[in-house]
Image: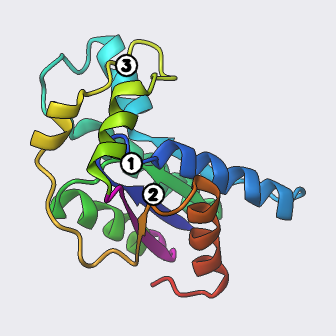
Amino acid sequence: MPLTVVGGLPAVGKTSVCREILRLQAEVQPQSQPPTWLRIDTIEQALRGSGEMLPGMPAGAGYYVAAAVARDVLASGGEVLVECVNPLPLTRRLWEETASAAGARFLSVELICSNAAEHRRRAQQRVSDIKGLELPGWQEITRRDYAPWPEADLRLDTARLTATEAARAIIGLHLADGTR
């Protein structure tokens, strides 16, 4: 799994799916090094906490920091799992360019939650595991700028799949070497 990007709106289950990917890979390959998990929320919260990124500022810096770290990890032969909203063609191209520059395979995954009531429930009930991070509310999520992503290699609906099922689908695509 050289560079895998798991994107989607907040509260669709990205963190749960990424945790499952790491857990399943550890079960199957206990001796191998797990992918480096880069969470844009963690990076951006650290930038806010340091005063380098002020509240309300556009949230692009975290993507560029993560891409730089990903390039280093890929250059050293490691694998990278990125968790981010990845809302726009600009951010999506960044990951493709990062993989290409490192000569790494690339897999883009979009998670959606087709059941609006379930998505809203998740948004209202979730709790952040990142110290100081204020999660967006349902109205913020529905108003968020998010472009369609038809070119994603894999699109998974977390209203129909468990986190484990989604993680298995992502791992399965890697095993089939369907990445570009």
- 1 and 3 marks in contact (CB < 8 Å): no
Residue 12 sits above or below residue 122 on the image: below
The residue lying toward the viewer, choosing from 46 and 30, is: 30
Q: Does any portion of residue 126 appear in the rendered image?
A: yes
Which residue is outermost to the front?
117
Q: Quadrant of the N terminus?
A: bottom right
- 2 and 1 marks in contact (CB < 8 Å): yes
Amino acid bearing label 2: Thr
Residue depicted at x 31% and y 48%: 85
Query: How much space separates mark 2 and mark 3, taking CA atoms?
Result: 23 Å
Secondary structure under tag 3 reads loop
Secondary structure under tag 2 reads loop
Q: In the displayed structure, does residue 97 sit left or right of residue 20?
A: left
Amino acid bearing label 3: Leu
Secondary structure under tag 1 reads loop
Dot 2 or dot 3, earlier in sequence: 3
Residue 100 sits above or below residue 70 on the image: below
Q: Which residue is mark 2?
A: 158
Residue depicted at x 23% and y 57%: 91
* Residue 95 picture location, percent across and down: 35, 63
Residues packed near mark 2 inside 10 Å, few (<14), some (14 to 19) or many (20 plus): many
Marks 2, 3: nearer the viewer? 2
The quarter of the picture where residue 26 lies is: bottom right
Q: Which residue is mark 1?
A: 12
Region in magenta: 102-114
Residue depicted at x 15% and y 42%: 142
Query: How much space separates mark 1 and mark 3, taking CA atoms?
Result: 17 Å
Q: In the displayed structure, does residue 55 sit left or right of residue 173?
A: left
Query: How much space separates mark 2 and mark 1, taking CA atoms?
Result: 7 Å
Amino acid bearing label 1: Val
